[in-house]
Amino acid sequence: MNAVTLATPLTPMPVSRFDQSRHVGRRSVSFGALGQVLRWRWKLVVGVLALTMLLVVGASYAISPRYQAVARLRITPNRPLVVAPDGEGGHGPLDQSLLSTEIATIRSRDIARRVVQANGLQHDPEFVSARLRSGKDEVAQARAVEAAISTLLERLSVDQQEKSYILAVGFQSRDAVKAARIANGFAESYINSTADVMMSTAARQADEGQAALQRLSKQAEVAAADVAHYRASTGIVQGANGATVNDQQIAPLSSQVATAEAAAAAARSNLETAEKQVASAGPDAVSAVLSSNVIADLRRQRTAAEADRSQLASRYGPIFPALIEANERISALDRQIHEEQARIIEGLRSEARAATAQAASLRGQLGSLKGEIAANNSAAVKAESLQRSADAATGAYNHLASSVQQTAQVEQSSQPQARLIEQAVVSSTPAFPNRPAMAATSVLAGLVLGVIAAMVTETMQGTVRNADDVEVLLGLRFLASVPRLGRKQLKGEDGGRCSPADTLLLRPMSAYAEAYRAIRSSIRRADGGSARVVALCSTVPGEGKTSSSLTLARVMAMAGERVLLIDGDVRRPSVRRLAHLHSDCGLIEVLKGEAELSDAILADHVEGCSILPVTKSTFSPTDLFNPGRMRALLEQLRPHYDHILIDTPPVLGVTDARSIAKLSDGVVLMIKWGGTPIAAVDAALAGLEHDNVPIIGAVLTMVNPRAEAVGALYYSRRYVSYYDR
């Protein structure tokens, strides 16, 4: 991001027309720019804050004060008015429903009626209007009482304190003594009413409970007798754990059946495998045969006998006695091996038959047991139904007995459910309005409203603020932003105030000077450098056009160019004054032929910069800028200067500006940042467009150094070291 935003057009951009009403007021304020907006609009924020505080504080003193008195009650949770369904009460977790019930009781109209009648509030003008108090008949008096009750309940507050059984009963009144009396009246009326209700409720519940106990006792006895009789008649015998004997036997028997069936399946599988091995490869291939220690021993003996026979056969003939004996021993071993193989296979068959038989026997026992259980199911269902009825009757009896016992205890005790632990006292300070709180709230509200007002004002702002406004709303190329100079920058060497153009001589490396170097670069690039005669125009007076013209001319001269600055504002000439020059003739005299051009042109303090001033204000009906004479003058000057700058009068105020602009190669429009309405700039552009004037671009002048147009805080922090402040 550069210190000075710069657009460098290659060709002048024609002015694009648009409906201004579609654009004015559409600027949005982002949260990122909020701080910037507040810096610009701080006076508005402070004004809204002061007005809000004045209104709120004034209203707090205009409102009639109200005093609040608070009485505190402690609720006793171990004596509920109505026994809970489960018969449980006493201490434990906080019973929020009990507290809600008591709060609603205190706020009831019956309690309020007692307070009204006890204190005669139906005749108090604070609670009843004069029209209702004036009535003498019973209906009017009843209406007055009801009106007083409604007003009383509106000012009554009942709150639980810090998740406890403490209730704060508060009341507000214009009279502090009356507020304390009414708050205490509510507390006392509530305590008295709870004692009365408790006694009457307990007596009624005790009478009803005794009758119900006798009825439930008979029902429980009959139900228990029915259960015992039915179990005896059906032969249902239960174990210690409540299950029947058959139910207790079926689980282990089922486990035995599963184990036996698994063993039988394994035995059959082994037999089937052995038979397949015998059929395919003979008995020697059977796994059980191969793993038999007996057969393994017989085979070793046969191997040894084979070795002996081989030695004898090699030495002797077939009739040798020892050889014959060896052959017989081998044959005997073969028979023993064959017999052992047959015995092993037959053992597998016997094992399979035994396992199958055992599994079948256990299945039979399980089936018989299931049959017995099925036969007893219908009887068991009915027995369970009878047992449930008996249990329900017994439970109802026990529950009611407990409730009747607690009710009897309540009846015997006259202690109320709540007691007063702190009486309301007369307050010396009003509770409403709370002036310190209202003042603090007014500060917060004022700040919020001030920020909103600043954002709305900025959103509806109809002036040019940044490069997007220039390029999007006006359709112009943005050339540069010229920062506004403060008192420090406008301080001369002698300590006095100097003009902005003089700061270029004192601080040639400032951000202000850099902005005009950017403008010079844009002019040099316009039309490939052919824009030599440039008119500097503004929409209205006071946009810094003349200072910008002199500063730009000096910047060009400091860059080694030959520059002529012509003061084209004959009604309010100021170039000569800003340049601190003196002359007896100038542009008007040259155009009228009363002076030579060489005598009218003055040398500026910067080498290479010349000035053709206007020596005095002229108001003439004649056309001083006759196209023929002015064009001839410009053509005469072109060969001698690299650039000719013309300081024109405001476009909307004087027609001379448009006449001069038509003779130039291009126009640079100077727009005051945040000052010139977009509608005014658009009107000026309409006139220049009608004259087919080529516009090089627009420059924002007098820009707040902290504004987005010159980089805002990022610019001031990151690039301050690059410039001579």
Image (tube, helix red, strand yellow):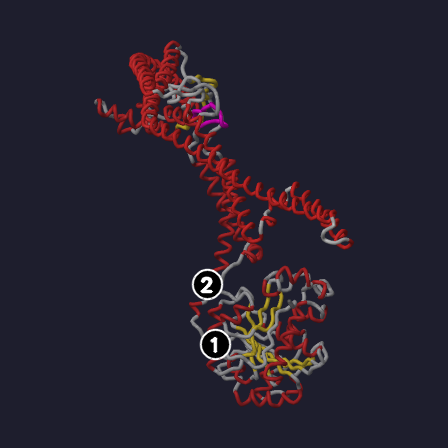
- Residue 431 vertical position relative to residue 138 in the rendered view, above or below: below
Which element carries disc 1, helix, strand or loop? loop
Image coordinates of residue 429 in percent, x first then y, are 49, 27
- Decide which of 322, 547 is in the foreground and name it: 322
Residue 3 at least partly seen: yes
Location of residue 119 (image quadrant)? top left
Which element carries disc 2, helix, strand or loop? loop
Residue drawn at (23%, 25%), measured in percent from left and top?
Answer: 140
Q: Which mark is residue 365?
A: none
Q: Is residue 334 left or right of residue 110?
A: right
Q: Is residue 365 left or right of residue 262?
A: left
Residue type at mark 2?
Gly
Q: Which residue is mark 1?
A: 16
- Decide which of 188, 532 is in the foreground and name it: 188
Q: Which mark is residue 25?
A: 2
- Decide which of 306, 370 is in the foreground and name it: 306
- Residue 452 vertical position relative to residue 58 in the rendered view, above or below: below
- Decide which of 107, 719 is in the foreground and name it: 107
Residue type at mark 1?
Ser
Look at the image and say whether residue 259 sits in the magenta stretch.
no
Q: Residues within 10 Å of mark 1 (few under 14, many from 20)?
A: some
Q: Main secondary structure of the magenta part?
A: strand
Image coordinates of residue 671 in percent, x first then y, are 55, 70
- Residue 153 vertical position relative to residue 39 in the rendered view, above or below: above
Image coordinates of residue 139 in percent, x first then y, are 22, 24
Q: Residues within 10 Å of mark 2 (few under 14, many from 20)?
A: some
Residue drawn at (33%, 23%), measured in percent from left and top?
Answer: 383
Q: Which residues are magenta?
A: 158-170
Q: Is residue 423 left or right of residue 499?
A: left
